[in-house]
Image: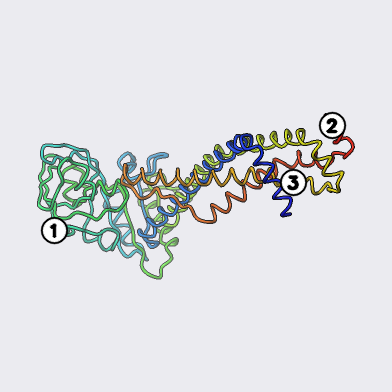
Amino acid sequence: MKAHFSLAFNNLRRRKLRSWLTMIGIFIGIAAVVALISLGQGLQNAISEQFETLGADKITIIGKAGFIVSPIASELSSKPLTEKDVEIIEKIQGVKIASGFLIKSLEVEFKKEKKDVLISGIEPDEYQKMFEGTYEIYNGKDLKSKDKSKIIIGYNTANKDFEKKIIIGNKLVISGKDFEVIGIMEKIGSPPDDSSIIININSLRELTNEPEIISMIFAKVKIGIEVEEVAENIEKDLKKYRNEKLKEPPKTFSVSTSEQLLETFGNILGVVQAVLVGIAAISLLVGGIGIMNTMYTAVIERTKEIGTMKAVGAKNSDILFIFLFESGLLGLVGGAIGIGIGIGLSKGAEYLATMALGTNLLQADTGMTLIGGALMFSFLIGAASGVLPAMQAAKLKPADALRYE
């Protein structure tokens, strides 16, 4: 085997230009596949971390309007979520606490500069009990229920979104009303969160003149209680209140556990990633055809050489292995180059996302499993592409091969 490998390697070295041109399709395909898989896996890991922070004991209730399921859909729905829904959820056995959120995009003015900013209206004491430890204040203090004209702001809101930096004590004008900044949050890594403003929900209702409507509801389940069971009870009781049929899916709201939301995101990412990898795999098919073409050409060029080897005792299996090793090496070297390019592309995308978008959700996960799998796959692609040419070479008769012109 060592002799076969050495002979195959030397044959490829003698035809450097052809070998490089043959490998182009392989390393382009492998580079694309490695970059897409590493970014997809990194994004999956980042989302999983976000949901771990959210906690497995949380249930999310979101408004639904037709096919739209989002906080905005609550306002579009014929029967939006309201404080009454929160009261019903709080009474369900197993629910420790339930809290409504109101999310609005409003015009914010600072030092005569105006921006549209995402405003999150919360009930501060309930929010802190619900999401203890999910965010930290690096400057100032947290919001309290009694703070009616005070706000806390995201890292980007304070440091990047406006031309002048916002500090503790500054006043922001939201829809014509002054609000004092009392706290600035640590950077979370999610652009919507880092560019947000958190305000008392009652203050936001006064600004928008919507006394009852809320965008979404979070419920925290008591320790030791089955989250799935509580979610089913929430869905059943809300259907009764909203006069919806118990045996049909809810029409005006959606109930999801953290695990279900994570699974949904995972499925969506999986489908998108599979489509992109499938497109990139076309390059591998082209590369495989290129290797096959090169190996057929090599068989024709080296017919006399094959005859000589057979005349001095080489077996059919020896000739077969030499050509298989050659094609496999083309795939392996092309794959190694592609892996290097793919890792570079994924790390470059991660850097750009961090610098330009301010998010750490897009991370490249370039583990040894991915690298080893890509190398093995590229070798197999190369070897498989060389099977037919190798078989043709092995079947040549010594006398015919020596007479070949």
State the residue position of label 1. Answer: 146
State the residue position of label 3. Answer: 322
Total residue callouts: 3
**Which residue shows up at 52% across the image and 39% down it?**
276
Q: Mark 1 and mark 3: span between their CA atoms?
A: 81 Å
Is 18 in front, or is 157? Answer: 18
Q: Earlier in the sequence, mark 1 or mark 3?
A: 1
Is 313 in front, or is 142? Answer: 313
- Element type at mark 2: loop
**Which residue shows up at 72% across the image and 41% down it?**
386
Q: Mark 2 and mark 3: span between their CA atoms?
A: 20 Å
Q: Name the front one of labels 2 and 3.
A: 2
Is 103 in front, or is 386? Answer: 386
The type of residue carrying mark 3 is Ile
Q: Earlier in the sequence, mark 2 or mark 3?
A: 3
Q: Mark 2 and mark 1: span between their CA atoms?
A: 96 Å
**Which residue shows up at 65% across the image and 44% down it?**
381
- Give the x, y percent position of residue 341: 49, 43
**Which residue shows up at 67% across the image and 35% down it?**
289
